[in-house]
Amino acid sequence: MKHPIHPMLVHFPLATWFLATMADIASLFTNEQTGWVAGVLLVVGTITALPAMMTGLLELGKIDQQSPAMRVANQHMILIMTSWSFYAVSLFLRLNGTQLEQPELAAIAFSILGFISLCSAGWLGGKLVYEYGVGIHTQKK
Ligand code: HEM
């Protein structure tokens, strides 16, 4: 494989988590259906993040332990795991058995926290690629 598979897989959780948070905020002003859509998006985001994490870990293993990129990669990983946890709690709070319910304020708050953490993690992911050249042939380490 000439380039990492990780960037291909990250779009699914990024898009669904982002839309879930937007739908959660919209649910404060609209009808019940918007909150339900947010719940479905959270399920998809939380599941599709798992293969993205696995491929990310494979890329992490290729970075030189002593390089400054390793510190940024660890920060990226911790923030992504924080996002995943916030979104998972948000999802859990709106579940009644296997039924998705209208999100309450706490569930929406966790969704917003997940999004803030996700933006920071995405920024660091971009830094890894565009500043340190991780995953690119001529790596600057
Ligand atoms: C927790 C395990 C993870 C680790 C160890 C990890 C590690 C990495 C590494 C090493 C890179 C740079 C090389 C590459 O692009 O393949 C990267 C880039 C990136 N990662 Fe992760 N990652 C993880 C999970 C995730 C998840 C779940 C997402 C999305 C929700 C994500 C979003 C990104 C983004 C947006 C980039 C920049 C890609 C680009 O601009 O081409 N990462 N990650």
Image (spheres, rainbow, N blue to C red):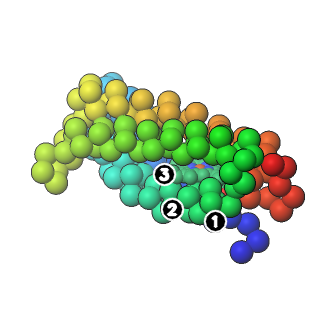
Q: Amino acid under label 2?
A: Met
Q: What is the number of the mark on residue 54?
A: 2
Q: Residues within 10 Å of mark 2 (few under 14, many from 20)?
A: few
Q: Amino acid under label 1?
A: Ile
Which badge, 3 or 2, comes first in the chain's sequence? 3
Left or right relative to 23: residue 71: right
Mark 3 residue CB less than 8 A from any atom of ligand 1: yes
Task: Tell me how far mark 2 sits from mark 1, CA to CA.
Answer: 10 Å
Task: Tell me how far mark 3 sits from mark 2, CA to CA.
Answer: 13 Å
Left or right relative to 32: residue 79: right
Mark 1 residue CB less than 8 A from any atom of ligand 1: yes
Task: Tell me how far mark 1 sits from mark 3, CA to CA.
Answer: 14 Å
Which badge, 1 or 3, comes first in the chain's sequence? 1
In this orientation, does residue 14 appear?
yes
- According to the picture, the residue beneath numbered tag 3 turns out to be 13
For the point 41% across and 44% down, which residue is it? 84
Callout 3: helix, strand or loop? helix
Single out the residue that lies furthest toward the left: 97
Residue 107 spot, x, y in % from top left:
28, 32
Nearer mark to the viewer, of 2 and 1: 2
Mark 2 residue CB less than 8 A from any atom of ligand 1: yes
- According to the picture, the residue beneath numbered tag 1 turns out to be 5
- Asked where in the image residue 72 lies, by quadrant, the reply is top right
Marks 2 and 1 close (CB-CB < 8 Å): no
